[in-house]
Amino acid sequence: MQSRSGRLTVFAAGVAAMVAAASAAADGIPYRQVADMLYQVMSADREVYTKMVIQRLMVDDEVITASEHFEDDIALPLPAQMFRFGAERVADETEDFSYALLSLQPINKKNGPGTGLEKEGLEFVVDNEGENFYGEEELGEQRYFTAVYPDYAVSEACIRCHNEHKDSPRTDIKVGDVMGGVVIRFPVD
């Protein structure tokens, strides 16, 4: 079993890799290419946690549950929470980029689109299977490159939680459905 310090070291290494990839945009690699690379890391980590931890321990082996109140319930954090924790950690380390998991039909209303471009991007990835959305927007005095990638229901654990949650606006999600999107944003010079 990996120690807590070992897990933190692995997590910190992942954050460092994402920050390094983001700074590549400043070194002349196109924002779109950097966003695509970051998404591949985020998507892989999210799918691995969902399938190898949540699906296996909660659904298949019924060893432990996952809960939005994981600390009080002595449970595993939900995949969306793990994703948010990573995004918060990255925000503490750099202003070179940010990312979030958003949805047009979020369980938690705070996870809905916050800008017109986020909404447009989420609608695009829902309506255009397998395609990503790229655009630019101005927020405050700063211009941003923004990319939106589809977030898929990858396991029975995803659909069970979303379809059965008391606050879920959807109860018909199936494995493979787009549930929302990963939004990655870089300030443009």
Image: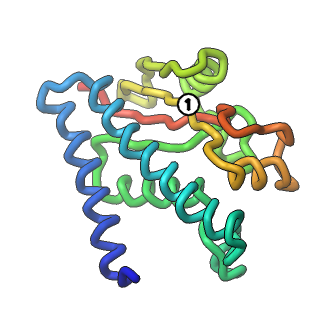
Q: Is residue 177 above or below residue 85?
A: above
Circle 1 residue: 150
What residue lies at 44% left-to-right and 21% top-to-bottom?
137
What residue lies at 40% left-to-right and 83% top-to-bottom?
1
**Whole-percent x, y for residue 12 in the image:** 29, 65
Residue nearest the viewer, comparing 92 with 176: 176
- Write down the quadrant of residue 8 in the picture: bottom left
**Whole-percent x, y for residue 82 in the image:** 52, 60
Q: Is residue 148 above or below residue 90?
A: above
Q: Is residue 6 above or below residue 10?
A: below
Residue nearest the viewer, comparing 160 with 87: 160
Question: Is residue 179 visible to the viewer in this orientation of the structure?
Answer: yes
**Whole-percent x, y for residue 3 in the image:** 36, 84
Q: Quadrant of the C terminus?
A: top left
- Write down the quadrant of residue 113 in the picture: top right
Count of marks, rendered view: 1
What residue lies at 55% left-to-right and 31% top-to-bottom?
150
Query: How many C-alpha atoms fall within 10 Å of the one at disc 1: few (<14), some, or many (≥20)?
Result: many
